[in-house]
Image (tube, grey):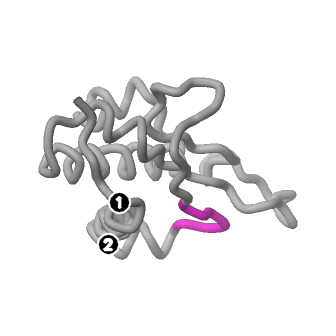
């Protein structure tokens, strides 16, 4: 049974997860916004999604681009968690995972590092 949690509380957990990212990384993040949405329309089971041009792929011609987006899918996360503690952990893992994509890490490397 999915965990019930208000949108506000879930957004606070995303903000808390972002606060746990070391300042060295948050200061290096460039032109990226973090959003919370209920579910991904194309893949309702998806927990998070990075959409943009990773920092490692930006060249000298990068400029004037719309912000990259990191979307955290609230209802998808709540549906795979058993309690509030699970939600806190899954939000952190998902936020770190998607931020890592912004820095150019792929899924294989993230799984190796335990952030799958």
Which secondary structure, mark 1?
A: loop
Q: Nearer the viewer, residue 36 or 60?
A: 36
Q: Is residue 92 above or below residue 109?
A: below
User: Mark 2 or mark 1: which comes first in sequence?
Assistant: 1
Report if the CB atoms under discs 2 and 1 are less than 8 Å apart: no
Horizontal side, residue 33 vs residue 77: left or right? right
Query: Is residue 63 at least partly visible in the picture?
Result: yes
Residue at screen point 53% across, 43% down: 104
Residue at screen point 28% across, 31% down: 80
Specify the quadrant that holds the N terminus. Answer: top left
Residue at screen point 69% across, 47% down: 52
Asked where in the image residue 116 lies, by quadrant, the reply is top left
Residue at screen point 31% across, 28% down: 111
Disc 2 or disc 1, which is closer to the eye? 1
Circle on res. 6 = 1
Q: Disc 2 marks which residue?
A: 19
Q: Residues within 10 Å of mark 2 (few under 14, many from 20)?
A: few
Residue 100 x %, y %: 44, 47
What residue range appears in magenta?
Answer: 29-34
Q: Nearer the viewer, residue 112 or 35?
A: 35
């Amino acid at each position: 049974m999915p965990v019930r949690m208000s949108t506000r509380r879930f957004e606070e957990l995303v903000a808390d997860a972002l606060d746990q990212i070391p300042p060295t990384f948050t200061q290096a993040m460039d032109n990226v916004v973090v959003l919370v949405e209920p579910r991904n329309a194309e893949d309702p089971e998806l927990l998070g999604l990075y959409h943009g041009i990773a920092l490692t792929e930006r060249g000298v011609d990068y400029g004037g681009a719309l912000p990259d987006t990191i979307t955290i899918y609230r209802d998808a996360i709540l549906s795979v968690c058993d309690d509030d503690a699970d939600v806190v952990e899954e939000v952190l893992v998902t936020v770190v995972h998607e931020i890592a994509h912004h820095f150019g890490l792929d899924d294989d490397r993230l799984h190796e590092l335990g952030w799958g």
